[in-house]
Amino acid sequence: MTNPDQAKFQIVTSTLLPHKCLACEGKADGTKQFVDFGVSIDYEGAMYICVSCAEEIARTVSYIPPYERDEAILENDRLRSDLIESEERVRSLTDTFVSFNMSIPDDRRSGDSDVELFKVDEAGKPDFEAAESGPFK
Ligand SMILES: [Zn+2]
């Protein structure tokens, strides 16, 4: 019987016979981690599954191991930071384009010019859709 004060499954490196994973039959070497089921079957011995097989089982039921979750959180934080930095660059470039476009005389910005970068809307923001020609068309 299992001890009610003890977790149902234990991680161990020290195993009893048959000293192997019941799924992949990987042998215990004293350093490899196994999940001890706390169950022993007559003529078979103690039931263990190696941590690698346990992770594979967990993935089968859509469980993400903590280290992968932590890596995903770090990657998400990095991507979020990159996105904020990219948005700041786009905002800066947009401001530069607006300033540049505003420095072009009106008659060169509208239909009189061969190249129209973009028009500026009432709020002073570039309206790329309104331009009829230029590098964004
Ligand atoms: Zn295994």
Image: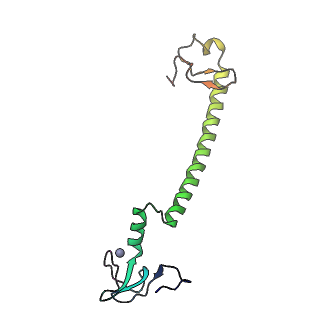
Q: Considering depth in this image, is 40 or 102 the residue closer to the camera?
A: 40
Residue 3: % across, % down: 52, 86
Relative to 91, say whether 27 is above or below. Answer: below
Where in the figure is residue 132, as x and y percent of width and height?
53, 16
Ligand 1 located in image quadrant: bottom left
Magenta span main SS: loop
State whether residue 110 is above or below residue 75. Answer: above
Residue 59 vertical position relative to residue 116 in the rendered view, above or below: below
Q: Position of residue 79 (x, y in %)?
A: 55, 50
Which color scheme is applied?
Answer: rainbow
Task: Tally the numbered discs.
Answer: 0
Q: Position of residue 50 (x, y in %)?
A: 39, 77
**Which residue sits at x=52%, y=66%?**
66
In this view of the protein, which residue sits in the foreground, 20 or 112?
A: 20
Res 85 → quadrant: top right
User: For this rendering, which residue is in front, 72 or 78?
Assistant: 72
Q: Is residue 29 magenta?
A: no
Specify whether residue 24 is painted magenta. yes
Q: Which residues are magenta?
A: 21-28
Residue 37 as seen in the image, left or right of residue 133 = left
- Residue plotted at (64% across, 36% down): 91
Q: Residue visible at 52% across and 61% down?
A: 69
Taking 20 as reference, is 129 above or below it? Answer: above
